[in-house]
């Protein structure tokens, strides 16, 4: 709500009093417009200057009315402004306006629906990858956490079509339904898919039944934190070194090398070429670890003669500089 709306009533009252005073002095005293305005200003400001001209009885009654009503209204107006400043409503309103502009301008971002423990970890990973994101959650406390960071957020029901539109789901690259409620995640997925056929949706599920419903609702990928954590713990117990290596490559904040993926379009300079013909390693220094074909099948041991086709996704490892060179080569 705009905090300045509370000032409309006293402002309107002051305008009416001012008009009545100016017109009254002109009619009752026959003064000029300038003299009438001057008398009104000195009366409302209570500076105590002498009268412009000698007042008649009617003029004095008018002046008393202006003092009683106008000065009281002016004091009330000043009090409201002071209260708004003390409560931070003015600065809060300006901050919200800046946030609304940031939300309107954001694009190619990820929407995090639900900002609990899982949502916090997702945000941390996106920040580490320097990927822009926006949070939608019904809890008002998120404002205290996200405002200082400058992260755009929307407080409201994530299942609402209006909130998803406000979050720019039509412009977003992806949406992550991370609430701890399967029902909420299903509704968010349904709404997001109805609003955008291109947004990539990853949804959280607590079990197999919810997983099937989320896929039917339009989720591209469904993740069960319990399943993932169980598999991860088992891998750490059985293959600790391999698990540590993969974790370091995927999430190591200070690691020189990192994994990345590149989609091959029909306009890519390396489409319909073999890895050797594309000279990926020679021109960028990055290494192709795997190729996911357009039908979803993986080539986990791509050779020099392996062909790169439209719709393929290259899984690559390299330094940041190497990955940037490969991005230019691919696109």
Image: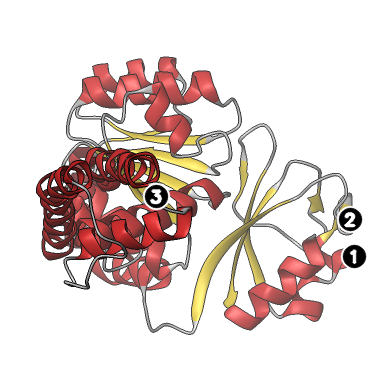
Residue 299 against residue 259 in the figure, above or below: above
Residue 2: percent from the left, percent from the top? 30, 43
Measure how far apart labels 3 and 2 are at the Cα level.
Answer: 38 Å
Q: Are marks 2 and 1 in contact (CB under 8 Å)?
A: yes
According to the image, label 1 marks what residue? 277
Residue 103 visible, this angle: yes
Residue drawn at point x = 59 percent, y = 25 percent:
197
Q: Categorize mark 3 by other alpha carbons within 10 Å: few (<14), some (14-19), many (20+).
A: many
- The quadrant in which the N terminus is found is top left
Rounded to the nearest angstrom, the CA distance separating label 1 from label 3 is 41 Å
Examine the image and state in which quarter residue 282 appears.
bottom right
Residue that numbered label 3 is attached to: 134
Instruction: Give the residue drawn at x 16%, y 60%.
Output: 237
Q: Give the SS element for disc 3.
A: strand
N-terminal-most mark, 1 or 3: 3
Cα–Cα gap, marks 2 and 1:
6 Å
154 or 83: nearer the viewer: 83
Numbered disc 1: secondary structure: helix
Name the residue rendered at 25%, 65% in the picture.
51
Q: Which residue is mark 2?
A: 273
Left or right: residue 269 versus residue 229 is right
Residue pictured at 20% horizontal, 61% vertical: 145
- Of 258 and 23, nearer the camera is 23
């Amino acid at each position: 709500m705009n905090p300045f709306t509370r000032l409309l009533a006293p402002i309107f009252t002051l305008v009416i009093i001012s008009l009545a005073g100016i017109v009254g002095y002109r009619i009752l005293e026959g003064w000029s417009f300038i003299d009438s305005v001057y008398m009104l200003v000195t009366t409302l400001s209570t500076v105590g200057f002498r009268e412009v001209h000698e007042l008649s009885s009617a003029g004095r009654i008018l002046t008393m009315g202006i003092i009683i009503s106008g000065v009281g209204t002016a004091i009330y107006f000043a009090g409201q402004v002071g209260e708004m400043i003390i409560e931070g409503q003015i600065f809060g309103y300006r901050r919200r306006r800046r946030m609304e502009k940031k939300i309107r301008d954001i694009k190619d971002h990820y929407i995090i629906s639900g900002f609990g423990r899982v949502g916090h970890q997702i945000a941390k990973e996106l920040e580490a990858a320097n990927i822009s994101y926006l949070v939608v959650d019904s809890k008002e406390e998120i404002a205290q956490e996200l405002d200082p960071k400058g992260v755009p957020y929307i407080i409201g029901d994530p299942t609402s079509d209006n909130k998803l539109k406000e979050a720019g789901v039509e412009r977003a690259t992806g949406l992550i339904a991370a609430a701890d409620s399967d029902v909420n995640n299903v509704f968010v997925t349904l709404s997001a898919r109805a609003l955008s056929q291109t947004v990539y949706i990853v949804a959280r599920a607590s079990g197999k039944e919810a997983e099937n419903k989320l896929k039917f609702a339009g989720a591209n990928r469904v993740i069960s934190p319990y399943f993932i954590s169980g598999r991860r713990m088992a891998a750490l117990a059985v293959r600790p070194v391999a698990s540590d290596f993969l974790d370091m490559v995927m999430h190591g904040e200070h690691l020189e090398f990192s994994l990345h993926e590149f989609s091959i379009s029909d306009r890519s300079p390396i489409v319909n070429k073999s890895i050797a013909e594309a000279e990926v390693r020679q021109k960028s220094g990055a290494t192709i670890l795997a190729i996911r074909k357009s039908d979803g099948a993986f080539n986990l041991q791509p050779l020099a003669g392996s062909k790169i086709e439209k719709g393929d996704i290259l899984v690559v490892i390299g330094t940041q500089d190497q990955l940037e060179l490969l991005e230019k080569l691919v696109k």
